[in-house]
Image: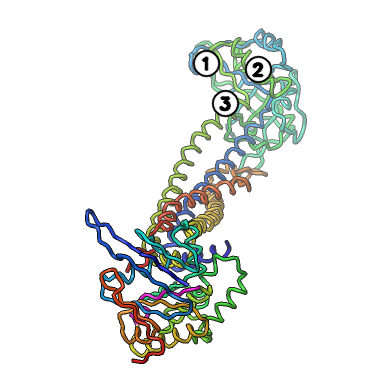
Amino acid sequence: MVKTINLKKSYTTGKEVYPALKGITLTIKRGELISIVGPSGSGKSTLLNLLGALDRPTSGKVFIDGVDIYQLDDRELADLRNRKIGFVFQAFNLISRLTAVDNVQLPLLIRNIDSEERRRKAIKLLTAVGLGNKINRKPMELSGGEQQRVAIARALVTNPSIILGDEITGNLDSKTTQEIVQLVQDLNRRFNTTFIIVTHNMDVANQTHRIIRLRDGIVEKDISLEKAVF
Amino acid sequence: MLNLLKLSYQALTERKLRAAITITMVLVGTALLTGLDGMSAGLNEYLVQEFSTLGANVVIVYPGGLRSGAVAKITDQTTSLVERIPGVVTCAPFIQQVLTVKSSGKSITATLVGVDRSQLTLIFPTLRLREGRFGSQSDPTALVGYLISNPPGEERFIDVGQIITLEVSIVSEGRRVVQTRNLLVDGALDYMGTQGTFIPVDRMVFTSTQLANSFLNKGGKYDGLYVVTETAELADKVSEELKDIFGGGAEIFSSRSLIRTIQSITGTINTFLGSIASVSLIVAAVGIFAALYTSVLERTREIGLLKALGFPKLVIIQLFLGEAVLIGVIGGILGNVGGIGAAYLLIGLLSGRGGFEGFDSSAPHTFSIQPVFTPEMLLTVWLFSVILSLVAGVYPAWRAASLDPVVALRKE
């Protein structure tokens, strides 16, 4: 479960203080599939970074599975990212010199897991995203959609509580976008992993369970779409 | 740990040319240091071996102070004075003159030495008789060095039992006259291998002091003294006593003091050359720094990703230090090998032109300088290059680990 309490974040450039988040309070249950939408500069990415323990808030709290994460030091925060959070990026961020299976294993490298077990887990996840036959391909040898599947497998391999996606379909055509959305829905059901994805694409947002619309650093709308069909 | 090293290695191989260039820089620096060390160790061994033909317990007195200009007069009285110094076993005065030796129509240049020949093996411990006998002070005969009986590249010059003619021009009663003297050769020495150094025994003709004295018209004056001490350690003490006796009128040498002097000179040269080689390694370290720093800039997003995936700071530092160390390890090993190869190649080139072989390639056991490499020395040079590489990687690695993941991930 993820919970934020009056989460605020300001950026200071010179003498100007720019408030990106003005107080976000949210509760996200395990297994939810949530989209965060809103115009540019509304604070979507800032919120995502704070949920992902990549940044520190100006004030307010974030709880992940009951842990007040910003009470942790940098080392503990890194460990939390490794164990509890998976990231999927717009630009995939795969390491080009590594094969698909090595990319997926990457988060497990800093854990005390033997290489056989690591590889077995990575292959299992690659199979789950439909790339069981391309595990030894390098990113350059895969299509955009396939690369994003590898990235999703990498996010899932640590069995995290939440997966954060930042415009995960932003670099894909509409057909591939639909495939990725279906994959996310499928994985969300199968692994009961919480997905929080930031998107501009309302077609994508409309296929999630809940849409959180931000505007000027506050939650403008929080609509539950469960069972609803548009 | 091994997994991280594999990641570092893969990162290196991704930028092959850059890795190759930095490794080459380390290679060149390490090779220079290795080669120089090997050559100087070889030179040192060569010098020690050369000077050890003169016994370590032998001190030589040459009249004529290099600094003072005064010239001590060495006579039989001086000799008996020196013999009374505690620790002195014996004192052999000698007369020495470069002259022409003729035999059956041919002639060669040699150094005539008038000395008590029965003392020769005390003075030159490695001296061996090949044929005949050493001869005593009462024998008006000659004992010839190996290269007198067997001149390099020529047929045999003289045999034991044959007569040689000594010919020298000296000043007698104010006039320059040519003196000649026939001598029976009754002994021939084995090869010593000291040609080109300060006592060319192989090119010497030994006879008694009396004969040399009258032939060269020396009037009872000697050209120097060989002072044999009880032990090598006493040579230094006796040298000091001799300096007191002769003041500035004579130069006092021992093989120990000569080796020390030469080693201090070669040591200075080695330090100089070594610092040049070290500078080239430092340049290599700067190269590693530049390459890694560029790599950190290029891989900002990758570093951001690793941080997002929960890689701790220390692990990211290890990843980049791993690259630096790999460059150092590979460059260091190749440099060791390259340095050994270069040292042998250089020695080969030099001796191919006769530079280090001496001038008698026909001699039976020619002794030339061989580079000397010890495992400790190779390891030291190797460690030096690895540590320098590591140091060069510290800042780029720290920079990488300190990147803000939010900013790093946003970088295009």
Residue at which label 2 appears: B237
Locate residue B83 relative to residue B62 in the image: left or right: right
Q: Where is residue A190 in the image (x, y as percent from the top left)?
A: 52, 85
Region of the chain picked out in magenta, as a range: A161-171
Q: Which of the two discs, 3 and 2, sits closer to the camera?
A: 2
Write down the residue under mark 1.
Answer: B65
Name the chain under label 1: B
Residue at which label 3 appears: B98
Q: What element carries label 1?
A: loop
Q: Is residue B182 shown left or right of residue B28?
A: right
Q: Do the residues labelled 1 and 2 touch (CB within 8 Å)?
A: no
Are the residues at dot 3 and dot 2 in contact (C-beta closer than 8 Å)?
A: no
Identify whether B281 is placed above or below B54.
Answer: below
Foreground residue among A10 and B118: A10
Residue type, label 2: Lys
x then y, percent, for residue B104: 64, 35
**Which badge, 3 or 2, is on the more N-terminal residue?**
3
Amino acid tagged 3? Val
